[in-house]
């Protein structure tokens, strides 16, 4: 790679962005086409098909919103929530809290369901919140702030019984942790490119099912940029593509390629690899005295959040990992600022080689011999 600015080499193993693969980097560098070029239109159709595959959905509407993951959140709320709607919002980390803020800004009546940070929200708590009726329910499937995967079992039934929509943030699960939108009855979901897809930040994979499409038709969208009735004039393709805003052409090449990677590997195989990678890294870091926040069974395979041991200087360790070892990990956020590290297990990062580099460097920074931890890592990858 050439740049007029001298960029350092880094291995990105934090909460995102994740490492961009060479394959994706090459795709990003392809010649820019016009956004109305029919050849680009064919790529867009294929991109939507790939998104349906990785989202496990047959939804007609599946496209990337222009903007990072949060732009997907904005699109969801601006098009599916009217002022005064009762929206149940599950909050068990930073991203649930962010959604509650977003909903309130759009005039929703937010019914907060607060779970413990670092745990999944019990179904009983969500059920309890439905007793006064509601228009939509939102949960974060993959809480990147705590490394917890929220089970969606039972939520679609609650929503159907109330003629309400089930809305999901799957930014850090898409392509890394089992996600089956249609089977789970999800009506709308958004994701991001820079977590398990190993594509740079800047697009938000997004999908809407038929019930959500029907609701969107009744909502007066307050945003021009994210108004689906305008945006889909470009993305739906039928009857020609109408210009709304210029599509981020090269980033779309990158996403198309990143999704190709996921599909070639196969979703089941990819989920299994992330599960194995998470387990192997956990064994290794336990040998270094670190403990996972999430209890067994509630962990998010694509993100391992661990408690920082007593007496260890968070900033000093992360600083030397980055500047001396060239490895980025993430600190804690919100309630866990200063007490937690977040280790990404995302796509490229869910492989033995990058994990070995991380474990060796962490061992050195924590004053351990790396041998035991590396043996645990290897055992985690090879055991059945
Ligand atoms: C990263 C992330 C987001 C926000 O995505 P941006 O790309 O930073 O806008 C939202 N939700 C979750 C769970 C995330 O991990």
Image (cartoon, rainbow, N blue to C red):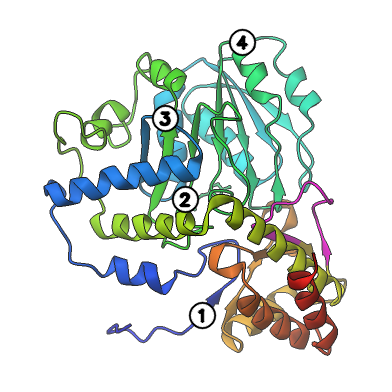
- Which element is circle 1 on? loop
In which quadrant is the C terminus drawn? bottom right
User: To which residue does mark 3 refer?
Assistant: 59
In the displayed structure, 285 sits above or below 96; it is below
**Mark 2 closeness class: few <14, some 14–19, many ≥20 residues within 10 Å:** many
Q: Would you say the beta carbon of the disc 1 residue lies within 8 angstroms of ligand 1?
A: no
**Lower sequence index among marks 1 and 2:** 1
Nearest-to-viewer mark from 4 and 3 = 3
**Lower sequence index among marks 4 and 1:** 1
Mark 4 → mark 1, Cα distance in angstroms? 49 Å
The residue lying toward the viewer, choosing from 305 and 105, is 305
**Mark 4 closeness class: few <14, some 14–19, many ≥20 residues within 10 Å:** some
The answer to if 300 sits in the magenta stretch is yes
The residue lying toward the viewer, choosing from 343 and 356, is 356
- Which element is circle 4 on? loop
**Residue 82 visible, this orientation:** no
Q: Residue furthest front?
A: 384
In the displayed structure, 54 sits above or below 159; it is below
């Amino acid at each position: 790679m050439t740049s007029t600015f001298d960029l350092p080499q880094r291995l990105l193993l934090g909460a995102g962005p994740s490492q961009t693969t060479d394959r994706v980097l090459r795709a990003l560098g392809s010649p820019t086409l016009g956004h109305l070029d029919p050849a680009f239109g064919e790529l867009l159709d294929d991109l939507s098909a790939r998104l349906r595959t990785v989202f496990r959905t047959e939804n007609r509407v599946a496209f990337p919103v222009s903007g990072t993951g949060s732009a997907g959140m904005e699109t969801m709320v601006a098009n599916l929530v009217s002022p005064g709607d009762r929206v149940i919002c599950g909050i068990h980390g930073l991203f649930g809290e962010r959604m509650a803020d977003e909903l309130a800004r759009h005039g929703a009546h937010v019914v907060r369901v607060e779970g413990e940070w670092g745990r999944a929200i019990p179904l009983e708590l969500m059920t309890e919140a439905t007793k006064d009726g509601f228009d939509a329910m939102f949960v974060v499937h993959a809480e990147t702030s705590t490394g917890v995967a929220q089970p969606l079992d039972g939520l679609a039934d609650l929503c159907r019984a109330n003629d309400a929509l089930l809305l999901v943030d799957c930014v850090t699960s898409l392509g890394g942790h089992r996600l089956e939108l249609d089977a789970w009855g999800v009506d709308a979901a958004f994701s991001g490119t820079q977590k398990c897809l190993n594509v740079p930040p800047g697009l938000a994979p997004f999908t809407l099912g038929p019930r959500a499409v029907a609701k969107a038709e009744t909502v007066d969208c307050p945003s021009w940029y994210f108004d689906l009735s305008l945006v889909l004039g470009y993305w739906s393709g039928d009857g020609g593509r109408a210009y709304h805003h210029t599509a981020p052409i090269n980033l779309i090449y990158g996403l198309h390629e990143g999704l190709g990677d996921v599909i070639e590997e196969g979703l089941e195989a990819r989920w299994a690899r992330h599960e194995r990678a998470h387990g192997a890294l956990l064994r290794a870091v336990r040998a270094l005295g670190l403990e996972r926040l999430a209890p067994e069974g509630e962990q998010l395979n694509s993100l391992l959040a661990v408690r920082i041991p007593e007496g260890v200087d968070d900033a000093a360790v992360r600083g030397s990992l980055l500047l001396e070892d060239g490895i980025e990990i993430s600190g804690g956020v919100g309630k866990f600022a200063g007490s937690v590290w977040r280790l990404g297990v995302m796509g490229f990062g869910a492989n033995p080689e990058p994990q070995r580099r991380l474990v060796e460097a962490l061992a050195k920074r924590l004053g351990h011999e790396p041998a035991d931890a590396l043996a645990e890592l290897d055992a985690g990858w090879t055991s059945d």
